[in-house]
Amino acid sequence: MPTIDEQVEILMSGAAYGEGEEAQQIKEKMSAELRQRLIEAERDGRPLKVYCGYDPTTTDLHLGHTITMRKLRQFQELGHDVTFLIGSFTSLIGDPTDREEARAQLAPEQVEANAQTYAAQAFKILDRTKTRVRYNAEWLAPLTFADLIRLASKFTVQQFLQRENFKKRLEVGEAIWLHETFYPLMQAYDAVAQNTDVQVGGQDQLFNIVVAGRQLMEKLGMRPQVAIIMGKLLPGTDGEVKMSKSVGNHIPIMSTPEDMYGKIMSIPDKAMPVYHELLLGYTPTQLAAFAAQLADGSLHPRDAKMGLAYRIVKVFYGEEGAQQGQAHFETVFQRQELPDMEDYALAGEQPVVDVMVAVDFARSKGEAKRLIEGGGVRLDGAKVEGFDAAVRIADGETKVLQVGKRKFIRLVKA
């Protein structure tokens, strides 16, 4: 078992609290508090209670979420009690962080459906036998209006308006809806309800965890939890904006090996170092060596990216999945050949949008139409034009339907 100081170094690695002197002071304070908690835990023979929350706003988690999961895994490997918290109640509002407008509110049925696969996805990173899965509706749903008033009295409006996105909206005259201010309050109560020692979160959760969460615990007479805020956010496939389901630049955990490999290959070269750091755990020394190899030409960017894609896919799908993803990429993109694909039996003439939905290349006809409008749908290599395009298969004939760069299906006559 590592020493206390070694554990602090491991667990605080990658943590950051903004920029400047104040941020450094916060990090030093969190490090000192974590060290004290670890000393007490060792003395008392108990593990620290650690958690991170994930809102099921859609059905899939993505690679960006795994940054905090890897930190939870470090706590597990050091013997601590980890909770994977599903925000079944907070997601009814949606986190307003980094939003220039209010999120659309989700129906409880939609949230429940989205949450069903979250735990299974988390176990791609976390140890299933050492992970506690909880839903925050357990304690948030029973709160009364009187409870809400009591909790809200612990904060001022001015504090909440210091949130960067609220401040920006206020400056340009954009609406700040009252229900949005409930989100950090509810997330803060998650820590109270669980009486946790540590909360892990991304940089976008700095206010929710460091300000709201710690202050509410302290105001209610509890010892404030240690906040471990991961300093870097994983950029999406555009290499610019943080990976986000709402932006559409994400790489789902529950993708296919081919899709995950292909999407990683699509990221800009400039994003490779941060992917190596956050997803593969490269140290500063390893990153410097990687950059030197790219600079002197001993490592081609394409080969570096293929190695990156292979190793990441291997984490989620094993050696066989990584080989499968690479083979598909080489076939379709490097040799420009058609990959192996399944058959879909077509009875009579069918609209292309119906076929796309039937084979799960689109979740709805509306999405299928948007894909066609964007020029991403091809039939036997020819771009499909128009939403009302239909396809018919003659006896002995086959056609290939392609959606995007990685989805192929062979159409045959029923």
Image: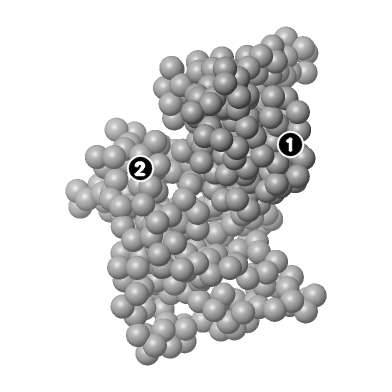
Q: Nearer the viewer, residue 177 or 200?
A: 177
Q: Are marks 2 and 1 in contact (CB under 8 Å)?
A: no
Amino acid type for the residue under numbered disc 2: Ala
Residue 365: horizontal and vertical position, in percent? 60, 50
Residue 88: horizontal and vertical position, in percent? 39, 63
* Residue drawn at (56%, 51%) of the image: 364
Q: Which quadrant would the N terminus be assigned to in this image?
A: top left
Q: Nearer the viewer, residue 225 or 363?
A: 363
Residue 212: horizontal and vertical position, in percent? 50, 70
Amino acid type for the residue under numbered disc 1: Val
Q: Which residue is label 2 attached to?
A: 120
Q: Which residue is label 1 attached to?
A: 384
Tell me if I can see residue 31 in this picture: no
User: Which structural element holds mark 1?
Assistant: loop
**Location of residue 264 with respect to 118 vertically, above or below:** above
* Residue drawn at (40%, 37%) of the image: 125
Q: Which quarter of the picture shows residue 137?
A: bottom left
Tell me if I can see residue 161 in this picture: yes
Which label sits in the foreground, 2 or 1? 1
User: Which structural element holds mark 2?
Assistant: helix
**Location of residue 100 with respect to 53 vertically, above or below:** below
Residue 116: horizontal and vertical position, in percent? 36, 52
* Residue drawn at (68%, 69%) of the image: 101
* Residue drawn at (73%, 25%) of the image: 381
Q: Whole-Å distance between the Cαs marked 2 and 1?
A: 37 Å
Q: Earlier in the sequence, mark 2 or mark 1?
A: 2
